Image (cartoon, rainbow, N blue to C red):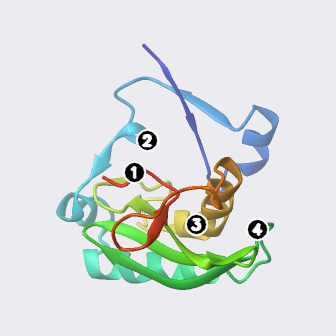
Amino acid sequence: MWSRVPFIDRFADEWMWDHGRFLVVPPDHPLLQTYGPKEYEALTGMPQAEYEHQLLTYARESFREELLNAVVVESVAIEDARLVVLFRLSDVPERRFGWHATVWPSPHPDDYSGTPDWGDAVATFVDAAVEERAPDTEAPDADGLIWLSPQT
């Protein structure tokens, strides 16, 4: 069985726009594999600490652009192998929100240098999560956070 996967690759951007932003790959293709920190370092030469540092840098910088939902970031950190963003919305400033994505295992790198450039899109992912939900009507967890991504 073949899989269609969303694909962000700076080297193939123009081609991908012309082909629906999907790449069709067989189930054993490396793009569908994930790697733990040691495997990732063996594949790319990038140690875990450097990967996480670069990911945090990319993620924090992604919030410098203006977003539709006026996200006010409180923190961006890596906790328990997850990239965690805590934020407020200007429309409901009294509420705190959270979004997270798995860091480890990590997806296959698109350029083999190991650069976690998916961090560039974190602000867009958070903005999309806000758009998909009704954050002003959701109940907070025990810590007072409303998670806009599934918490695992």
For mark 4, give the secondary structure: loop
Instruction: From the image, state whether disc 2 or disc 3 is nearer to you.
Output: 3
| Residue position marked by numbered label 4 in the rendering | 69
Of labels 4 and 2, earlier in sequence is 2
Instruction: Mark 1 and mark 2 in contact? Answer it, CB < 8 Å.
Output: yes
Q: CA distance from mark 4 to mark 1?
A: 31 Å
Instruction: From the image, state whether disc 4 or disc 2 is nearer to you.
Output: 4
Q: Residue at x 34, y 82 (%)?
A: 50
Instruction: From the image, state whether disc 4 or disc 1 is nearer to you.
Output: 4
Question: What is the three-letter code of the residue carrying label 1?
Answer: His
Instruction: Mark 4 and mark 2 in contact? Answer it, CB < 8 Å.
Output: no
Q: Residue at x 48, y 54 (%)?
A: 149
Q: Is residue 57 above or below residue 135?
A: below
Residue toward you, 96 or 83: 96
Side (left or right) of 120 relative to 77: right
Instruction: From the image, state whether disc 3 or disc 1 is nearer to you.
Output: 3
| Residue position marked by numbered label 3 in the rendering | 122
Residue toward you, 84 or 9: 84
Q: CA distance from mark 1 to mark 2?
A: 5 Å
For mark 1, give the secondary structure: loop
Q: Is residue 85 above or below residue 8?
A: below
Determine crowd level at label 2: few under 14, some 14-19, many 20+ residues with C-alpha closer than 10 A.
some
Q: CA distance from mark 4 to mark 2?
A: 32 Å
Of labels 3 and 1, earlier in sequence is 1
| Residue position marked by numbered label 2 in the rendering | 31
| Residue position marked by numbered label 1 in the rendering | 108
Q: CA distance from mark 2 to mark 3?
A: 20 Å
